[in-house]
Amino acid sequence: DAGITQSPRYKITETGRQVTLMCHQTWSHSYMFWYRQDLGHGLRLIYYSAAADITDKGEVPDGYVVSRSKTENFPLTLESATRSQTSVYFCASSVRQPNNSPLHFGNGTRLTVT
Amino acid sequence: AQSVTQPDIHITVSEGASLELRCNYSYGATPYLFWYVQSPGQGLQLLLKYFSGDTLVQGIKGFEAEFKRSQSSFNLRKPSVHWSDAAEYFCAVGMDSSYKLIFGSGTRLLVRP
């Protein structure tokens, strides 16, 4: 089925370790996004990508790295995980610019950093 | 700076009762407006959107929202709530000047039997 898939659904890692969260979409949407969701903060944009090989920072990019070598994949890497990065991470895609086009979300990855 | 405010963190209503969730934004021009719903353990799903035209928009699951420019508001309504509507609701605003959406902090809806 077409859609947006995130993996893993749950991840526990230790402080200082590198961890990569995967995101794959089958719609060939141009735009992809990574958000983190924390209680009281709603969703905050980490990074976004307008097309393959084009990425840009969102509101809270520090400590994260992204790449987009293929249109359908947009992995998010925490280079050296910290406890403050414990959160639920959502990947999303849209066919056009998200200010006037609906976002399609994955089911999220719950990351715990111990 | 642009912002979105959802003043109610939690709302509890009885099944069958009407519902209104509030959303206010701060932006100088007419924004693009969205309501998303998030069920437990799921990603967000679009309920409805407003880009232009009729200020009363209809969405999925019987929801509607009204854009009021004078009040900078985009409140979500439903005439009769069902138990399955229990979820978290997010208002979001898009602007011509940016690719990004700004999300409110969400309102959690609880439905009493």
Image (cartoon, helix red, strand yellow):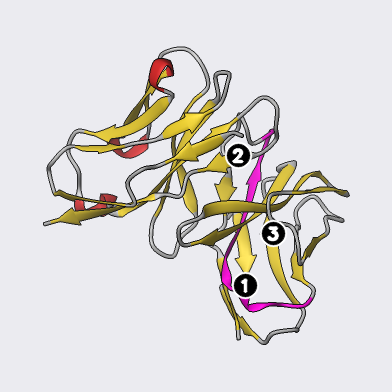
Q: In the image, is residue A12 above or below residue A58?
A: below
The residue that label 3 is drawn on is A24
Question: Closer to us: mark 1 or mark 2?
Answer: 1
Q: CA distance from mark 1 to mark 2?
A: 23 Å
Q: CA distance from mark 1 to mark 3?
A: 25 Å
The residue that label 2 is drawn on is B101
Q: Which residue type does callout 1 highlight?
A: Ser
Q: Residue B99: percent from the left, percent from the top?
A: 70, 35
Q: Quadrant of the N terminus of chain B?
A: top right
Q: Which residue type does callout 2 highlight?
A: Leu
Q: Are marks 1 and 2 on the same chain?
A: no
Residue A67 within the magenta-colored segment of the rendering: no
The residue that label 1 is drawn on is A84
Residue name at image x 13 percent, y 49 percent: B15
Q: Residue A42: percent from the left, percent from the top?
A: 50, 53
Q: Secondary structure at mark 2?
A: strand
Residue name at image x 62 percent, y 78 percent: A83
Q: Which residue type does callout 3 highlight?
A: His
Left or right, B109 with reference to A48: left
Q: Nearer the viewer, residue A34 or A57?
A: A57
